[in-house]
Amino acid sequence: MNHRMSFACLTFVLIVGVALTGAVGADEPYPVPDLLNVGPYVDSIEYRLIPSQDQRILALQTGEIEMDTSFLDMVNMLDLGCCDPDIDVFSSLRNGYGHISINCREYPLNISGLRRAFAFAFDKTRVTAEIMDGFSREHDSLVPFVSGWCAEEDLPYHYYTAQPGIGNRILDNLGFEVDPETGWRNAPDGTPFEIAIDYASSSPEIAGGVAQIAVDALHSLHIDARRQASDFQEYIRGPRDYDMVFYAKNFDTTDVQWLAYEFDLFDDYQYPMNFHNESYDALREELLTGTTYDEVYDAAAQMQRILHENVPRLVVYENIYMQGYRNDIYEGHVPDLTRAITGPWTMRKIHRIDGTEGGLIPVAIAQEPDSFNLFVADKAQSWSILDNLYSSLFAMDPNQHPVMDLARGFEVETHEDDPGVLEGHVMYTLDIVRNATWSDGIPLTAEDVAFTFTYLLETMSLGNPAGYRLTNLESAVALDTYKVRLDFNTESYWHFNSFAFTKIVPKHIFNDVDGIGYQGWNLWNPVFDSDEPLVTCGPYVFDDYEAGAFYRIARNPLYHYYPRVSPGSESGLMTPHLEFDAGTSGHEVVWIASQEHSMAGTYTLREGDRVISEGTWTGGSLSVDVSGLPPGNHTLTLEVTYLDGHQESSQVVVMVRPTGSLLSTLFKSTVFYLAVSLISAQVIVGVVILSVRDYRRWKQGSFAKIQEEEHDWFKEIFWS
């Protein structure tokens, strides 16, 4: 039997448009833990309802909770961070911003020059200093700075400071004349006008303060303006007449497909901006149907420049989010680009400081979860829990790189690659892990994966919003127990994102014969209305709850990445490894590079100081037959130097068992061959993972040294 230890290609990292960010104000990535997927190491997580921020802070100080999913205000952050050595404060630049949306339909706000003049007059530095106490940064692009798609640095000019002189010249040239009697400008047709800035009455300091700075900016342009407080509920009841409105916006991911839909349709708060621009509209199709990184990035960058010039929305700050957590009993908290310090990776990796397993982690939530139905749940509190209960084919790591979860390998094909694929289609064939199990003990197979996407398509016509991103999915078919094929009827850069992170549901629970069924997609109300256990496949299972008090999840012993070693253990399993009997043949180690720009270079494969192989690597795979190694453990190190000067190294452990040994005899059982089959297509070594921003800057020559990063799912093979 030829047991190949294949290091599968990771070119999809650039294909799917991931992004990388680091600590506040930096482009360095967050540290990614070893064996990222493996865990959890604690017995349970208990989400405790504490609506009052003061009570949550007190609970954090007394040790009643370990962390708070809510964000701290500046005053409390300073108190906690400066005065209590047992509490740390995590801060990160927000994946979102506060902004002023403008109704581009109403005259004279339908004149882009008026909106641009307002942007020049608005003082973002004043917002940072007076309202955000320095805990924000000035930003112009409507794509947040933390996204790799952000073109902030490529914009031709900025609106950071108050520049009313420029704004007044724009208005003078457009015919907005100042009425000598009122002192205010009239519209070019001679009619007087006033601009009202709406803000939520529930936020008089931040929202009201920003609205006042907007009024001051308009006054500096000799435009009559006022601010007006509104009930926040008016923001979500539907469209109504308005001039300008201030509110905040968050993004759950870093992709930018929303650029195609945001400005002429209703946004999150139902305020249509009514923005239409022919050049912008022409780029929509390129953004959504482009098949290469360059095509999509160029479209996104052009769209950002058009929005910057025409100002249907003015970003007024991108602020800093802060969360508090204790550091005296547990460690292993994982910073996350979109979920801060209390996201699912922290719940996966947190463990006692002494390295032992177990314990209950109490976590504060400010509101009751609204639902545990995946397709209905809307509140962040629900998803804080649900993200720990379900798995998907891929997950986003702390820096928004896709990493394998239920998938253990995949292939992408078009008609050009395989004539059997219809022209214009793209086919994804995915292998899934062999040891995934539903929490009721039923194996998770490719049938569940194929059924999930079929279920979403069938229920989309019944109103399920989870199916909308799959409108181009032609079919989802299980080819065998562990292989599924997804056929999309168009070629698009974004198809991967449309399926990769979808939570997989159990076919035996959701089917349309004796299960929840298609009609029940929104009626199913687990936990709250049913005594039946919630059947899931993630690192935790739902355990218990008391409405108004707590919601507890418990460690799932059936989880496919359930840890076999304690946290921090120096085990040989921390490195990809291959095992075989001495004297047998056909055992190979294969490396495959993921980035075309870095394939050319030289390599050296060594064991300690002994060079096993060296030469030139011009691309593709590097395969080494290790069958001749003598009995024992061998740590092989691959060192690669690329022509651009970038260097990297990776290790793999090869364990050769003496012929006739007891260990050899034991591992000749069915279990051994199953383990080998699981390992054979999983371990990845020596692959450079680049963010979109890293890749773009490398192309522009602005990085002297490309970011070195080895994804931890290289090391997770033993549990795959």
Image (cartoon, rainbow, N blue to C red):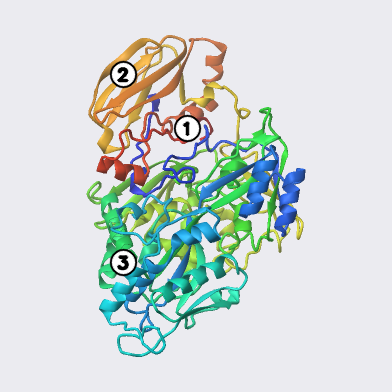
CA–CA distance between discs 3 and 1? 54 Å
For badge 1, the amino acid type reads Leu
The residue mark sitting in front, 3 or 1, is 3
Q: Name the residue that disc number 3 marks.
A: 309
Above or below for 259 versus 435:
below
User: Residue at image x 70%, y 39%?
Assistant: 43
Query: For residue 285, which numbered disc appears in the image?
Result: none
For badge 3, the amino acid type reads Glu
Q: Is residue 205 left or right of residue 660?
A: right
In the rendered structure, are the residues bearing label 2 and label 3 in contact, judged by CB atoms less than 8 Å apart? Answer: no
Q: Is residue 720 left or right of residue 4?
A: right
For badge 2, the amino acid type reads Thr
CA–CA distance between discs 1 and 2? 28 Å
The residue mark sitting in front, 2 or 3, is 3
Task: Tell me residue 437's x, y (percent).
Answer: 58, 43
Q: Residues within 10 Å of mark 3 (few under 14, many from 20)?
A: some
Above or below for 669 versus 214:
above
Task: Tell me residue 100's x, y (percent).
Answer: 46, 69
Task: Tell me residue 563's x, y (percent).
Answer: 60, 33
| Front position in the image: 401 or 31 | 31
Helix, strand or loop status at disc 1: helix
Q: Name the residue that disc number 1 marks.
A: 678
Helix, strand or loop status at disc 3: helix
User: Residue at image x 37%, y 77%?
Assistant: 104
Q: Name the residue that disc number 2 marks.
A: 604
Q: How crowded is mark 1: few (under 14 residues within 10 Å), some or many (20 or more)?
A: many
Task: Tell me residue 257's x, y (percent).
Answer: 38, 60
